Amino acid sequence: MIILPLLAALAFDLAPVRVTGDQVRRCIVDETLPLGRGTVEKRSCGPSLDAETAAKRCKEGVRHNTLPPGIWEENCLDEYTRGHFLFRGEIKELIIARRKDGAPLLVFKVPEGEHLTTFQHFADAVLIGVGGGKSFHYAVATTRGLLKAPYLGDPEEIRDVNVIGGRIRVTGRARAMYIDLVPGTDRLLIRK
């Protein structure tokens, strides 16, 4: 079950992205889940900036006071190259849905500053949630691609999303209202 902040907006609008082979090779596989006739893997990524760019970002971080606790100007570059922290906006994790033959189908990125809230298998699909602060974005991936969600109302009214018995349960602010979604051919279908 996912507990979201009381004023968070939630929507099924997480969009897939394009990444290069080099970006994928820099990341190591943490977890693999079944996905119908394929798999979906969660990969953790390390530092991706060259030394010159990282040094500039360290100086900016010192000037704007945005470096993590325990990191200061003298040790910033060393700690970054060791992988102890990433700069905001860098790719922290990749979620890659693959077909049975290993070809990538969908790729989602989790940038530094956000976190992976949901990575859960159900039926022939995987529920993926990425968010931070006041917004959370979800997607449902299958080997046929990304499933579109029906209109669920105001994103401010949705309070939590969880998987119950092969269905996605979307619960509203009053906790009395809920909608169950099941995977269809090309979209999520509402089931009462």
Image: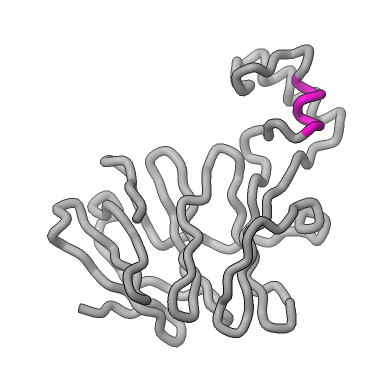
Note whether 29 is above or below 33 in the view shown.
Answer: above
Image-based side of 79 in relation to 125, left or right? right
Q: Quadrant of residue 86?
A: top right
- Where is residue 53? Give x, y as percent: 81, 30
- What residue range appears in magenta? 76-82
Residue drawn at 55 percent across, 37 percent down: 113
Residue farthest toward the right in the current orientation of the protein: 51
Note whether 189 is above or below 163 in the view shown.
Answer: below
Image-based side of 57 in relation to 42, left or right? right
Residue drawn at 50 percent across, 60 percent down: 119
User: Quick check: can you spot residue 106?
Assistant: no
Residue drawn at 56 percent across, 77 percent down: 35
- Where is residue 147? Give x, y as percent: 46, 75
Protein image colouring: one colour
By secondary structure, the bulk of the magenta-drawn segment is best described as helix
Tally the numbered discs. 0
User: Quick check: can you spot residue 164?
Assistant: yes
Residue drawn at 58 percent across, 69 percent down: 33
Q: Nearer the viewer, residue 171 or 84?
A: 84
Quadrant (top left, top right, bottom left, bottom right) of the C terminus: bottom left
- Where is residue 83? Give x, y as percent: 75, 35
Q: Residue 179 magenta-drawn?
A: no
Quadrant (top left, top right, bottom left, bottom right) of the N terminus: bottom left
Q: Residue 77 magenta-drawn?
A: yes
Image-based side of 130 in relation to 192, left or right? right
